[in-house]
Amino acid sequence: MSVDDAIVRKIARLARIGIADDQVPALAGELSAILGWIEQLGEVDTAGVAPMTAVIPNHLAWRVDAITDGNMQAAVLANAPDAASGFFAVPKVIE
């Protein structure tokens, strides 16, 4: 794909980048080269290549998926300005 001066100006306007008129032809050439490299990557046969998320092997540490209360109710409520019946007490906001 070839990028012309009008497309460079449109991209600069959309990206809110100010470019001088003498920079437009150089940027058009650079963007055309980048798009050419992307087209070359599209020609690579990746049929037998498995997708990967990182270049090094990563394994997630699994834990038991269990619901707990943390056994810290008293410690948490000690920080509350007002507590009642094991819960945070807040002022009534709706009558």
Image (cartoon, rainbow, N blue to C red):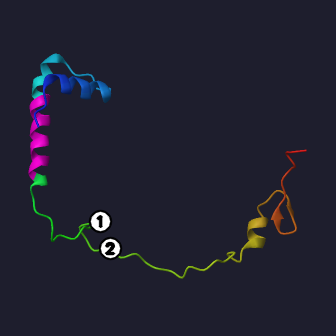
Figure check: 43 above or below 47:
above
Q: Is residue 33 magenta?
A: yes
Which label was assigned to residue 53? 1
Which label was assigned to residue 58? 2
> What is the number of callouts on the image?
2
Figure check: 8 above or below 90:
above
Spot the residue most to the right: 95
**Picture coordinates of residue 42 (x, y %)?**
13, 53
- Magenta region, residue range: 27-40
Question: Which kind of residue does numbered mark 1 sit on?
Answer: Thr
Magenta-drawn stretch, dominant element (helix, strand or loop)? helix
* Lateral position of residue 34 relative to residue 69, left or right: left
Question: Which kind of residue does numbered mark 2 sit on?
Answer: Asn
Q: Are marks 1 and 2 in contact (CB under 8 Å)?
A: yes
Select label 1 or label 2 by which is in front. 1
Quadrant the N terminus occupies: top left
Figure check: 4 above or below 44:
above
Spot the residue most to the bottom: 64
Q: Quadrant of residue 80?
A: bottom right
For marks 1 and 2, the one nearer the N-term is 1
The residue at 46%/79% (across/down) is 62
